[in-house]
Amino acid sequence: MSALAVAPTAGGAGRPRLEVDLAAVAANTRLIAGRTAAELMAVVKADGFGHGAAAVARTALAHGATSLGVTSIEEALVLRSDGLTAPVLSWLNPVDAAYADALRAEVDIAVPSREHLDAVVRAQRGGPHQRSARVHLHLDTGMARDGAEPSAWAALCRAARRAERAGLVRVVGVMGHLGCADDPADECNVLGRRRFGWGVEVARGAGLRPARRHLAATAATLLDVRSHHTLVRVGAGLVGIDPTGTTPLRSGLTLTAPVVSVRRVRAGSGVGYGHAWTAPAATTLALLPLGYADGLPRAASGRAEVMLRGRRRAVVGRLSMDQAVVDLGDDHAEPGDVATVLGPGDAGEPTVADWADWADTLPHEVVTGIGPRVLRTTRPAEPGPAVPVPAPSAVPTVLRSLP
């Protein structure tokens, strides 16, 4: 008792599609910028949280952001090669990173140690460059990750001031990060705010005058005005992720996939690897051509749903590398029908937050994990046709010439 119907494929048919709605990014940027008196840095690391770094950057800058933030120098150079001229800060680099390239492209560099400072100074001396290296001294405010340990902070500030007097660097900022910002009263944040204030005073005592002082990321920007200082860094919030659960942000992603085949199976039929699910009764199954290689978290197996023909349907069996099976019961679907895997939720479809809950993970992991096989389009913030854009690669290997 198994009848199989298969969809023909042609051109791009048969491929999952991801649409990025930049109107959501624009609305989120305006809302968040209106919540603070500080300047807003749009963080577009990880290809703009999977939404397209250049597109998110341009949209955010047009709707309230004044600068951009990324982790690596390579990410910053991609923005420059895409024609973005706004200030860009890169804050996570090894000592032997391409600092000379960053200085030529007028990228600000975060400095978390004396060794990093010395590397930036060597790159500046190897110039010529149009200006002194712009650096943000990075203090560990309690997360034991990036940033200078408090015991090394005063010496780093003094060394930076010597380099500044020599005309090699200009300390334009001091930065830190809060580990529990979704709960402002948490002792971790109390310590972080106190340590950051101390760090700024030590920097000033060394003769530095950092105009940009930034501690808050998305959660602290939304909940804790005490951490705002002169600049806030917002990335997840721009793309509709609210770590605090307090703010009506708009999701800008819609992921769809076509049904490639439909079959009727008997009661007791096993589905997928290990037969983790067996049909309790005769049922109809639809196959979607995407799986964990495309960003669907395998941990969501047995809990996930998609929207198909106006109803939520259970994804059954284990999610495979590139296949997902949907249980339709006694309903029917046709090959070529389109399932909404995730979207803003306006029509009842699953959301990024739903997938994160099903996989016991963060929305951040879901949006940054959507793979390069998925066909991407970007819908502008202003009315206009959808524009195809290339899928991101994990690490940029070839950069276009810098402007």
Image (tube, rainbow, N blue to C red):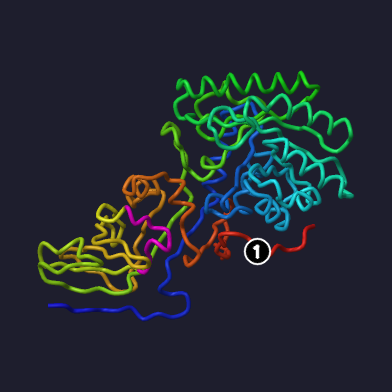
Circle 1 SS class: loop
**Which quarter of the picture shows residue 82?**
bottom right
- Of residues 55 and 320, the one drawn nearer to the viewer in this rendering: 320
At x 15%, y 72%, the residue is 265
292 with respect to 211 (left or right)? left
Q: Which residue is mark 1?
A: 397
Q: Is residue 91 above or below residue 260?
A: above
- Of residues 73 and 250, the one drawn nearer to the viewer in this rendering: 73
366 with respect to 105 (left or right)? left
At x 86%, y 49%, the residue is 126
Label 1 crowding class (10 Å Cα cut-off): few <14, some 14-19, many 20+? few
- Of residues 152 and 286, the one drawn nearer to the viewer in this rendering: 152
Residue type at the position of mark 1? Thr
- Image coordinates of residue 397 in percent, x first then y, are 65, 63
Which quadrant does the N terminus fall into? bottom left
Total tally of numbered discs in the picture: 1
At x 33%, y 65%, the residue is 320
Q: Is residue 379 above or below residue 330?
A: above
- Image coordinates of residue 80 in percent, x first then y, are 73, 54
318 with respect to 62 (left or right)? left
- Image coordinates of residue 201 in percent, x first then y, are 70, 18
98 with respect to 383 (left or right)? right
Whether residue 296 is in magenta: the answer is: yes
At x 88%, y 36%, the residue is 167
Whether residue 332 is in magenta: the answer is: no
Which quadrant does the C terminus fall into? bottom right
Identify the magenta region: 289-299
